[in-house]
Amino acid sequence: MMAEAETQKDDMLLEVKDLTVRFPVKRGGIFGGKSYLYAVDDISFEVKRGETLAIVGESGSGKTTAALAVARLVEAYSGTVRLGDEDFLALKDDDLRRARAKVQIIFQDPYASLNPRLRAEDIVSEPIESLNPLGKSERQTVIDGLFKDVGLRPEQQRLFPHQFSGGQRQRIGIARALATQPELIICDEPVSALDVAVQAQILNLLRKLQKERDLTFLFISHDLGVVQHMCDSIAVMYMGKIVEHADRKSLFNDPKHPYTQALLSAVPSVDAKRRRNTKRILIPGDPPDPINPPQGCRFANRCPIAEAKCNESQPPLREIKGGHKVACHLA
Amino acid sequence: MTVPLLKVENLRIELATRDGVAPVIDDLSLELGVGETLSFVGESGCGKSMTALAIMGLLPEKVGRIASGHIWFNGEDLTKADDARLRQIRGNEISMIFQEPMTSLNPVYTIGEQISEVLRRHKGLSQRQAHAKAIELLDAVRIPNPQARVDDYPHQMSGGQRQRVMIAIALACEPKILIADEPTTALDVTVQAQIFDLLRDLGQQTGTATILITHDMGAVAEMAERMIVMYAGRKAEEGPVDQVIDSPRHPYTKGLISCVPHLLDTLTDERPELTEIGGIVPSLRDFGKNECLFASRCTIADEKCRANRPPEAEFDNQQRSACWHAGQV
Ligand SMILES: Nc1ncnc2c1ncn2[C@@H]1O[C@H](COP(=O)(O)OP(=O)(O)O)[C@@H](O)[C@H]1O
Ligand SMILES: Nc1ncnc2c1ncn2[C@@H]1O[C@H](COP(=O)(O)OP(=O)(O)O)[C@@H](O)[C@H]1O
Ligand code: SF4
Ligand SMILES: [Mg+2]
Ligand SMILES: [Mg+2]
């Protein structure tokens, strides 16, 4: 028993605990003091080494902010991020520089995230060079290898970002992310800007690289079909909170949170059987003002099964069966 | 069969580009019946929006022109209609909604004023009547508390609400055809479900025919009766939605369906690699070539495909496919 618990612990690459990120917002009026928008509000999740955790949720639910906080690209207000053996948010100076190399990000818009004035080879090698400068031939070997791995031709190394298609630019972004030999790659909507045919190429590439290099992915997407294909486990966010967290099959086949149920039911499907068997749950209205969240469950005003107690207190995220966690009073 | 509401015949639209004139729409024919929902799918750059703009008489000025073919609407050839007539038809008989409602709404007028304006211009209603009708329309597109929201400015509404306002404006004059060009691409999936629900209900109530442009096969399956798959300015395949999705007759359609990871009824551990369609859509300057424009990406292409544009093969079940090997797909 002991031994099993320990190996499980070792298997975790990323453990996020009680993470909160808040942004100051200006309020109008004479009493317009400082208030805060809690974009990520006390969330916890973990990802096993070599696996993919997907984060889904509607726009503004805090997915990107959570990911950026994990990578220390926005400041966490509280909470911890354990990466392997290290308390990542507490690291400083050299330790931090070394650890940073282990976490890389791939963004949605490959065009906006690539420096237009740099050649593809320089974009890809920049992260390693800034870590420790390489000799000329060593550098070339690394670049050749990365270009080959992401499916770009050697003669494309000298081109500039605008000379590539959207899918090729995303390949450059992936090569750059791989350059420092990271353990964790955060993919923030990596295929949302791409056409479906190119999307398939990139998704296949990501899965291939994951297997070859034992990569761990934090995979953010609003496309549940894509998420289903990519993830091992999944966290559903709503207004800065994780409302459900489970492994892939439990979540898709047996969603417990009313929001997750509505979300899944809303996805149009080519599968006639799924269309027949899915009762669409429409959730009316909009999420409440994030600067002024309700004291009870944040989903209560749109929830089809809400009761009085839902407006009174926030439901905690609790395990209801083998690793399946839900934050709902009625689940 | 009765005369279709809309009949596009051998339409060719040319764009003037830096590299010369290119047929952005090349010999396109289609029909749309009263109250029917037809969907256009295909990757970006395949000419879906251009087809819609041509029907609306809104081709990019100086750049785009109808080179040949006809657009019959209720027996009238819109390719011969003058600007005044086209303006009359737009909004009154054929309306369109776009992907980004914010760019089509005027930020300095309330939504009530913008809906009323359409009603006064096209329907000749008085200010009072138009205002009352605007509230009715907001209610019809399920904006809660329409009496109060009618005085809101666009920025005071969410993306989903703005798209409903656009639908309200588009439907204000009870058009015969509503063209929706990627109306939910910028919206969350729960909001998309509300918009689709709304479009379906309104279509049933008013008998408006809908052309839904999308890149999402799921949306096609959910919303449309018939579909047209566009590739590089040409119709690759056409047919009843269920049949096309179940057994596509064009390699491109087949690729479009199988390259996407779909949500299935029951999820299993199995996760096969996604089918890839290698390469990308050819550039506009190659659109006119006498060959199958899909050949460079097609796994069953042969010499014939590269030497001649394939004609449309027609099957018993009303499926048509512009592929030399349609029978083998
Ligand atoms: N730099 C910032 N300053 C202020 N508010 C922000 C900032 N970044 C994000 N937010 C707000 O935080 C919330 C979550 O945003 P985000 O993490 O981008 O959500 P998602 O990625 O799920 O769409 C939103 O309400 C957003 O407006
Ligand atoms: N105003 C314009 N001027 C020049 N080319 C255009 C214009 N609008 C669209 N195009 C070109 O026409 C082709 C078809 O575009 P479009 O109809 O918008 O495709 P889709 O809607 O299928 O994505 C594309 O190659 C596009 O770049
Ligand atoms: S005509 Fe030839 S190249 Fe074109 S889709 Fe058919 S088989 Fe493929
Ligand atoms: Mg985001
Ligand atoms: Mg378009």
Image (tube, rainbow, N blue to C red):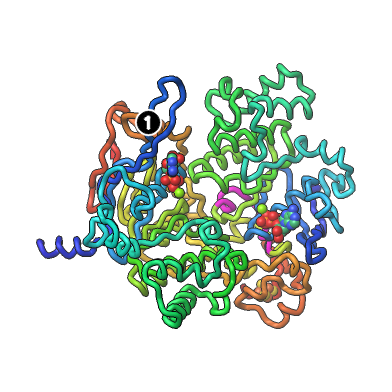
Question: Whole-percent x and y of residue B261?
Answer: 48, 61
* The residue stretch that appears in magenta: B219-231
Note whether B146 is above or below B155 in the view shown: above
Q: Residues within 10 Å of mark 1 (few under 14, many from 20)?
A: some
Above or below, A278 relative to A192: above
Q: Amino acid at mark 1?
A: Ser
| Position of residue B235 measured from the top left corner of the image (x, y, whole percent) | 72, 62
Q: Is residue A144 left or right of residue B239?
A: left
Residue drawn 64% across the image and 32% down it: B107
Residue wearing tag 1: A35
Residue B272 placement (x, y as % from top left): 43, 69
Residue B265 is drawn in which quadrant?
bottom left
Residue at screen point 37% across, 34% down: A36
- Which quadrant of the view contains residue B308? bottom right
Residue for point 60% across, 28% down: B153
Q: Nearer the viewer, residue B144 or B236?
A: B144
Residue closer to the observer: B145 or A217: A217
Left or right: A180 in relation to B258: left
Name above or below for residue B225 compared with residue A180: above
Residue at disc 1, secondary structure: strand
Give percent across and percent down for residue B116: 70, 25
Q: In this orientation, does residue B247 appear?
A: no
- Asked which quadrant contains residue B251, the reply is bottom right
